[in-house]
Image: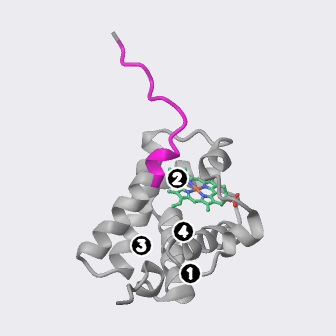
């Protein structure tokens, strides 16, 4: 029995490119996501390409990211940016918008959401401010 990979289910390179394009379009359009938009370069072309390469490989397609950029080390690569739970939530808001457009509701979409939420929370590298006494 052959298992269909998330890469194939999402429509391979083209489908994953569309997901990533919608993700970054949401980041530009959702006012609450302005803080994470501001962390990215003005021109998102390279950001789009990197996330696309990463997801193609991570979901079972050709390992484009590793070939070009080496081991992902995503947490280390995000250390230059102050990412708290607010920022992780903003990232998920954009990805949720993309998932709603490109993936039909159901267990596959839920699995993708869980995967992205886990990776996003593992990027958190600043503690929330102390509660006022
Ligand atoms: C938690 C909130 C997150 C924030 C605020 C954030 C922000 C950023 C920023 C500012 C960059 C650098 C600009 C760029 O190269 O595009 C970046 C790079 C990147 N991010 Fe995120 N990110 C987050 C979560 C994630 C998640 C969940 C993933 C994967 C599922 C991811 C994948 C990537 C990749 C692959 C790169 C390119 C790394 C490189 O090649 O240097 N990010 N991110």
User: Mark 3 sits on what residue?
Assistant: 98
- In which image quadrant can residue 14 be found? bottom right
Farthest right residue in view = 68
Query: Mark 2 to mark 4: distance in Å?
Result: 12 Å
Numbered circle sitting on residue 73: none
The residue identified by callout 1 is 61
Q: Nearer the viewer, mark 2 or mark 4?
A: 4
Task: Give yes or no for residue 127 being in the magenta stretch.
Answer: yes
Question: In this rendering, is residue 68 above or below 11?
Answer: above
Which comes before the other along the chain, label 2 or label 3? 2
Q: Secondary structure at mark 4?
A: helix
Residue at the (66%, 68%) spot, across then down: 50
Disc 2 target residue? 34
Indicate the secondary structure of the residue bearing disc 3.
Answer: helix
- Label 4 or label 1, whichever comes before in sequence order: 4
Q: Which residue is mark 4?
A: 24
The furthest residue to the left: 106
Kindly give the residue lying farthest to the top in the view shown: 133
Gap in Å between the C-alphas at discs 4 and 1?
21 Å
Give the magenta range: 119-132
Classify 10 Å Cα crowding around label 3: few (below 14), some (14-19), many (20 and above).
many
**Which of pointers 2 and 1 indicates the residue nearer the eye?**
1
- Label 4, label 3: how far apart the Cα atoms are: 9 Å
Task: Where is residue 49? Give x, y as percent.
Answer: 66, 73
> Distance between the Cα atoms at labels 2 and 3?
17 Å
Residue that lies at the very extreme toward the front in this rendered image: 1
Reading the chain from its start, which is encountered first: label 4 or label 3? 4
Magenta segment's dominant SS is: loop
> Which residue is depicted at the point 59% across and 38% down?
82
């Amino acid at each position: 029995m052959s298992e269909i990979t998330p890469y194939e289910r999402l429509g391979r390179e083209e489908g994953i490119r569309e997901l990533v394009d919608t993700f970054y379009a949401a980041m530009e359009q959702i006012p609450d996501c302005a803080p994470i938009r501001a962390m990215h370069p003005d021109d998102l072309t390279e950001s789009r390409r990197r996330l696309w390469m990463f997801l193609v490989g991570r979901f079972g397609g050709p390992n484009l990211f590793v070939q070009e950029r080496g081991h992902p080390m995503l947490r280390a690569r995000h250390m230059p940016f102050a990412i708290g739970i607010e920022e992780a939530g903003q990232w998920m808001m954009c990805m949720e918008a993309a998932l709603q457009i490109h993936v039909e509701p159901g267990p596959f979409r839920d699995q993708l959401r869980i995967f992205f939420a886990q990776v996003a929370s593992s990027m958190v590298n600043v503690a929330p401010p102390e509660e006022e006494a």
